[in-house]
Amino acid sequence: MWGFPVATQVLEVSPDGNAICRLEDIPDGGAIAVDIDSSTGGFSLILLRQGDRIFAYHNECPHAGRRLDWAPGKFLVKDGAVICAAHGATFDVASGAALAGPCRNGLAPMPLLVRDGLVVMP
């Protein structure tokens, strides 16, 4: 089944770090995009979920620097892989490694923690 969830934005700041969404905002087996503010203009992350495990990567295909989503916050996710909508590059959800397509490099990971149902940046 393909995952096409809607994007979310930064929700709140918790005392333990920046909460970027709730665990329940990410459909199991699917993905969402979140926009992160920064002093350099910000960036987009893709958050993927497999059960209680969350994986975060820069929302950018290493092949051509384009976003992975085919529409804002809508991703092609199937059988533990996410597929770049622009050129069909395929990446393993759990590791970010390139599995197929024009990419030689995997996705750039971002560390996240889940605390009390919130996904936070450490």
Image (cartoon, helix red, strand yellow):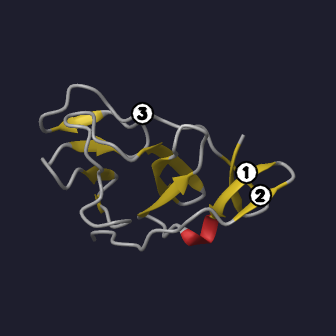
On screen, residue 40 versus residue 114, left or right, reads: left
Task: Say if mark 1 contacts mark 2, CB within 8 Å.
Answer: yes
Can you tell which mark lies on residue 18?
Answer: 1
Q: Amino acid at mark 3?
A: Ala
Q: Nearer the viewer, mark 2 or mark 3?
A: 2
Distance (Cα) linking label 1 and label 2: 5 Å
Residue 10, horizontal then vertical, whole percent: 62, 62
Q: Residues within 10 Å of mark 3 (few under 14, many from 20)?
A: some
Name which residue lies at 47% across and 50% down.
45
Distance (Cα) linking label 2 and label 3: 24 Å
Residue 68, horizontal then vertical, whole percent: 29, 51
Of the 4 image quadrants, the one containing the C terminus is top right
Q: Secondary structure at mark 2?
A: strand
Note whether 54 is above or below 6 in the view shown: above
Name which residue lies at 79% across and 61% down.
116
The quarter of the displayed image where residue 121 is located: top right
Q: Nearer the viewer, mark 1 or mark 3?
A: 1
Q: Residues within 10 Å of mark 1 (few under 14, many from 20)?
A: some
Q: Secondary structure at mark 3?
A: loop
Q: Amino acid at mark 1?
A: Asn
On screen, residue 19 versus residue 86, left or right, reads: right
Residue 107, horizontal then vertical, whole percent: 36, 36
| N-term-proximal mark, 1 vs 3 | 1
Can you tell which mark lies on residue 108?
Answer: 3
Name which residue lies at 21% across and 25% down.
104
Q: Residues within 10 Å of mark 2 (few under 14, many from 20)?
A: few
Note whether 25 is above or below 89 in the view shown: below
Q: Amino acid at mark 2?
A: Val
Distance (Cα) linking label 1 and label 3: 20 Å
Q: Seen from this angle, which residue lies furthest right?
A: 15
| N-term-proximal mark, 1 vs 2 | 2
Circle 2 is placed at which residue position?
A: 13
